[in-house]
DNA sequence: TGTGTCACCTGAGCGC
DNA sequence: TGCGCTCAGGTGACAC
């Protein structure tokens, strides 16, 4: 599932391929992927625009275009944005973009949760998820004191707090479970129950698991590939996610899987208090 | 206002 | 073999 490391890997793989390229034509096979504007306007406004930068904010990919427009892509669960020499014939191809160099950018999305926007830069606030997004955990604006204060102000389960994009940007189910394991914190603990020392451990653990995820070019369980179609390697290094019933890599205790906030959650009952 | 739950969506895996 | 059920999870809408 694309979280911050996966989206960052897609960004890094697409950047050298897209910079300076212009979009010749968009072909839309599933219009509801386009959230703003309508599909017809999206196609018309995108045609002929040149890519100036490829950025990321949380799990959003921000493709900055000439004329002060930004093409915003969210991969959600199974979205893939893949640069290719050919127009994909994949069963789940939802949109494809013909580039001026003869190559294609294919958007494949099995479960069709992915979304796209094309807005002038002064209207990006219309995307609520972008407007309310919390600090980038690998940037300087992620500050321990603010993070601790946010945890202290809520009785919600710490796992649910970390999944909340207004608290920290870019975390999803995989990296939240991994960060909580690394910090030795039980996922059900209320945010306000964490000591400053525990919050500091969690703060560092979040940075660590995300950095490792990026170094390993993302986690591929089934669908995720980068912008060149390559799978990630981080799934081979996970301590808890996807390992319910197996032994803890630290103490050997059987890892427990349960549902928290509607999501599968794996933790070590001995290492995480 | 804060928090929890559910729908959206398709395919894999499992039991019968 | 085929059917039906459950599960996977990011986000917005909704209920309490």
Image (spheres, coloured by chain):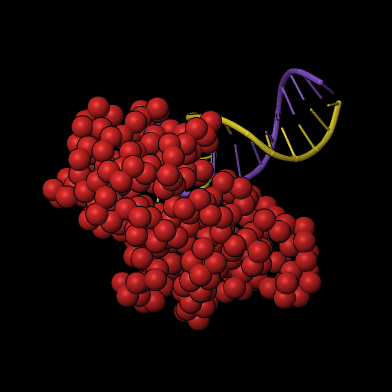
Chain colours: A red, B yellow, C purple
A183 or A174: nearer the eye?
A174
- The residue most toward the front is A102
Figure check: A147 above or below A41: below
- Residue at 28%, 35% in the rendered image: A25
Does residue A175 appear in this view?
yes
Any part of residue A131 in sight: no
Work out which residue is located at the far bottom of the displayed protein and give it: A197
Expressed as whole percent of the image width and height from the top left, the position of residue A233 reads 59, 62
Picture residue at 34% right of the left edge, 65% below the top: A135
x and y percentages locating residue A148 in the rendered image: 41, 73
Apparent side of residue A62 relative to residue A217 in the rendered image (left or right): left
Front residue of A15 and A211: A15
Residue for point 34% across, 38% down:
A97
Quick check: A225 left or right of A247? left
Residue A240 image-quadrant placement: bottom right
For the C terminus of chain A, the quadrant is bottom right
Q: Nearer the viewer, residue A168 or A90?
A: A90
Front-most of residues C12 and C15: C12
Compared with A121, A255 (above or below) is below
Q: How many marks?
A: 0
> Is residue A43 shown left or right of residue A167?
left
Residue at horizontal 66%, vertical 64%? A236
Where residue A100 sits in the image (x, y, percent)? 27, 43
Above or below, comparing residue A226 to residue A98 in the picture: below
**Residue A270 quadrant:** bottom right
* Residue A259 horizontal side relative to residue A100, left or right: right
> Where is residue A69 drawn, in percent x and y?
19, 47
């Amino acid at each position: 599932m694309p979280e911050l490391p996966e989206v960052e890997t897609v960004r890094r793989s697409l950047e050298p391929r897209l910079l300076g390229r212009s979009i010749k034509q968009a072909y839309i096979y599933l219009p509801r992927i386009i959230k703003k504007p309508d599909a017809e306007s999206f196609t018309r406004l995108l045609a002929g625009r040149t890519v100036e930068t490829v950025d990321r904010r949380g799990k959003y990919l921000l493709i900055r275009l000439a004329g002060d427009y930004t093409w915003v892509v969210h991969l959600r669960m199974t979205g893939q944005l893949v640069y290719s020499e050919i127009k994909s014939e994949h069963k789940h191809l939802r949109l494809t973009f013909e580039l001026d160099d003869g190559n294609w950018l294919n958007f494949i999305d099995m479960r069709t949760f992915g979304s796209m926007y094309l807005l002038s830069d002064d209207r990006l606030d219309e995307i609520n998820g972008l407007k309310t997004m919390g600090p980038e955990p690998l940037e300087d604006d992620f500050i321990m004191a603010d993070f601790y204060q946010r945890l202290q102000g809520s009785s919600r389960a710490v796992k649910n707090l970390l999944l909340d994009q207004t608290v920290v940007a870019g975390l999803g189910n995989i990296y939240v479970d991994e960060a909580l394991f690394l910090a030795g914190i039980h996922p059900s603990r209320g945010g306000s129950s964490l000591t400053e020392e525990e919050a500091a451990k969690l703060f560092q653990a979040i940075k660590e698991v995300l950095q490792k995820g990026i170094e390993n070019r993302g986690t591929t369980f089934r669908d995720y590939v980068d912008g060149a179609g390559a799978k990630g390697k981080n799934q081979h290094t996970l301590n808890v996610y996807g390992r319910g019933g197996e032994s803890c890599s630290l103490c050997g205790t059987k890892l427990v899987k349960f549902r928290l906030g509607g999501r599968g959650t794996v933790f070590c009952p001995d290492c995480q208090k």
